[in-house]
């Protein structure tokens, strides 16, 4: 499809578009997925360092940091949803060759989230302590975590803007630079965390400061790009379009994703509240178990981002057969990663539990291992879920993704946990692991059904690019 609009487009951007539309499907998936997965790996290592550093101080501090991280995930679900929505819109527009409109969509989203980030920081700072109380924090955990949380609130606002910027970079298929800058950012965080806490013994508050410094470095990179003349999405006030022609499709795509992720993250906070009733160490142990599983599932969640962009591009050109090929390439990649990951985590489950237990000793390590021995079984199912998520995002079926997230929480996770806790109280922490297993396998099976339906719709040409701007 010829590109006829007036926006100056670099040769690199044109070649990326041609590759995504006509290149070898597996090579396209790998080219976009692998940089994102590298970013995911470094992000995971960064979160592990936080957990290990905090675990050497105090068990209550560990539970506070784990639970605050989940509250942070709950709030950043908003950014994740709109990053997905804007990425879908921009991918479709670039796929059609409508670069002028893509630039306007990108500029509008970025300005909107810059303003939203500032407003969100102010609002949450004022409500910091009530939010922690709502998250089932006791007095000691509030005392330990309030300073950490206040700094993390600023990181949340900065992270919202960063998420949207990275979503737009993903939409144009340019992930290498943003991956490198994020890796450098997280390397900075690791160094600062080590210096602040391990060398100078400054405590968990400084872990949050290290995170904020790293997040601000990514924001700086984004702002520098947005003023470059050759950058596809160079910011200009005249390109901002606050009208329903843009916000209607953006909200239609984004709100279901945000709501689904928000409610699911809120469910994790509810789960932590239930876990506290089992054992005060249980939230920390459950969070660590989630983190160990995340060493694998974190990678496959990034593959769904790559898949959704490629599907969006090809939907704009009605390349139905290619869309199916992209899905199966992503599924094959995810299955390979999760099967290998499951085997390795099974082999090294004991040393991993001991490592993450830190100064908690053998009792803490055994608690982690009891939960993880069940949770790890669902890793492969989550890999399938990620591949299907990428497919439904790319097709614009974001309401389906919301149903999946709500089902994972309210159909599979919380009911199974309540049943285990009330009917089998003697299992104690083990019930948390079983509930995680039921939840993950349940959503995996549900994803298989949804995936089959979506593939049949694509095969019968019942999907279409219905985004009009």
Image (spheres, grey):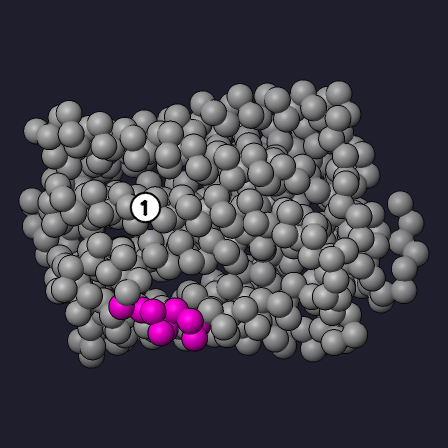
Under circle 1, the secondary element is helix
The reply to whether residue 295 is in sight is no
Q: Is residue 126 magenta?
A: yes
User: Which residue is painted at 34% across and 69% down in the image?
Assistant: 127
Which portion, as a residue range, is magenta?
121-129
**Residue 371 figure quarter:** top left
Q: Residues within 10 Å of mark 1 (few under 14, many from 20)?
A: many
User: Which residue is painted at 33% across and 40% down in the image?
Assistant: 293
- Identify the residue position indicated by label 1 in the image: 268
Q: Is residue 84 magenta?
A: no
User: Which residue is painted at 81% across and 39% down in the image?
Assistant: 317
Nearest the viewer among 246 and 333 is 246
Q: Where residue 330 sits in the image (x, y, percent)?
A: 57, 34
Give the quarter of the figure containing the N terminus.
Answer: top right
Q: Where residue 35 sits in the image (x, y, percent)?
A: 55, 52
**Total tally of numbered discs in the picture:** 1
User: Does residue 210 lie above or below 45 as drawn?
Assistant: below
The reply to whether residue 116 is in sight is yes
Query: In the displayed structure, does residue 379 sit left or right of residue 366?
Result: right
Taken as a whole, is the magenta stretch helix, strand or loop?
A: helix
**Residue 14 figure quarter:** bottom right
Nearest the viewer among 134 and 1 is 134
**Residue 247 figure quarter:** bottom right
Q: Where residue 109 sits in the image (x, y, percent)?
A: 65, 63
Nearest the viewer among 68 and 129 is 129
Q: Where residue 216 sits in the image (x, y, percent)?
A: 47, 74
User: Does residue 422 lie above or below 267 as drawn?
Assistant: above
User: Which residue is painted at 27% across and 57% down in the image?
Assistant: 134
């Amino acid at each position: 499809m010829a590109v006829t609009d007036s926006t100056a487009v670099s040769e690199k951007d044109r070649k990326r578009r041609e590759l995504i539309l006509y290149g070898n499907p597996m090579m396209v998936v790998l080219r976009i997925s692998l940089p994102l997965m590298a970013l995911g790996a470094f992000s995971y290592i960064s979160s592990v360092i936080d957990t290990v550093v905090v675990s050497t101080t105090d068990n209550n501090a560990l539970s506070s940091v784990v639970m605050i991280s989940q509250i942070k995930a709950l709030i950043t679900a908003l950014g994740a949803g709109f990053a997905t929505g804007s990425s879908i819109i921009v991918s479709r527009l670039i796929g059609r060759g409508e670069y002028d409109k893509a630039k306007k969509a990108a500029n509008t989203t970025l300005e909107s989230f810059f303003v939203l980030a500032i407003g969100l920081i102010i609002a949450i700072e004022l409500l910091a302590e009530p939010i922690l109380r709502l998250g089932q924090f006791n007095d000691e955990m509030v005392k330990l975590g309030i300073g950490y949380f206040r700094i993390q609130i600023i990181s949340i606002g900065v992270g919202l803007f960063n998420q949207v910027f990275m979503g737009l970079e993903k939409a144009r298929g340019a992930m290498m630079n943003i991956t490198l800058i994020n890796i450098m950012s997280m390397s900075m965080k690791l160094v600062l965390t080590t210096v602040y806490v391990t060398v100078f013994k400054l405590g968990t508050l400084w872990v949050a400061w290290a995170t904020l410094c790293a997040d601000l470095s990514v924001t700086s990179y984004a702002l520098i790009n947005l003023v470059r003349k050759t950058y596809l999405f160079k910011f200009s006030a005249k390109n901002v379009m606050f009208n329903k022609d843009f916000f209607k499709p953006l909200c239609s795509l984004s709100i279901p994703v945000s709501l689904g992720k928000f409610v699911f993250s809120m469910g994790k906070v509810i789960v932590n509240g239930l876990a506290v009733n089992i054992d005060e160490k249980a939230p920390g142990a459950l969070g660590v178990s989630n983190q160990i599983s995340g060493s694998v599932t974190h990678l496959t969640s990034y593959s769904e981002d790559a898949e959704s962009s490629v599907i969006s591009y090809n939907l704009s050109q009605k390349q139905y057969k290619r869309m199916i090929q992209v899905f199966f390439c992503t599924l094959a990649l995810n299955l390979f990663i999760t099967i290998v990951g499951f085997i390795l985590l099974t082999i090294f489950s004991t040393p991993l539990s001991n490592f993450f237990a830190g100064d908690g000793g053998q009792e803490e390590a055994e608690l982690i291992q009891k939960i993880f021995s069940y949770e790890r079984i669902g890793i492969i199912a989550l890999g399938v879920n990620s591949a299907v998520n990428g497919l439904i995002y790319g097709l614009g079926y974001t309401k389906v993704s919301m149903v999946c997230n709500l089902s994972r929480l309210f159909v599979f996770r919380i009911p199974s946990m309540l049943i285990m806790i009330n009917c089998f109280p003697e299992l104690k922490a083990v019930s948390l692991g079983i509930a995680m297993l039921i939840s993950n396998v349940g959503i995996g099976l549900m994803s298989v059904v949804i995936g089959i339906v979506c593939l049949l719709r694509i095969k019968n040409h019942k999907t279409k690019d219905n985004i009009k701007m």
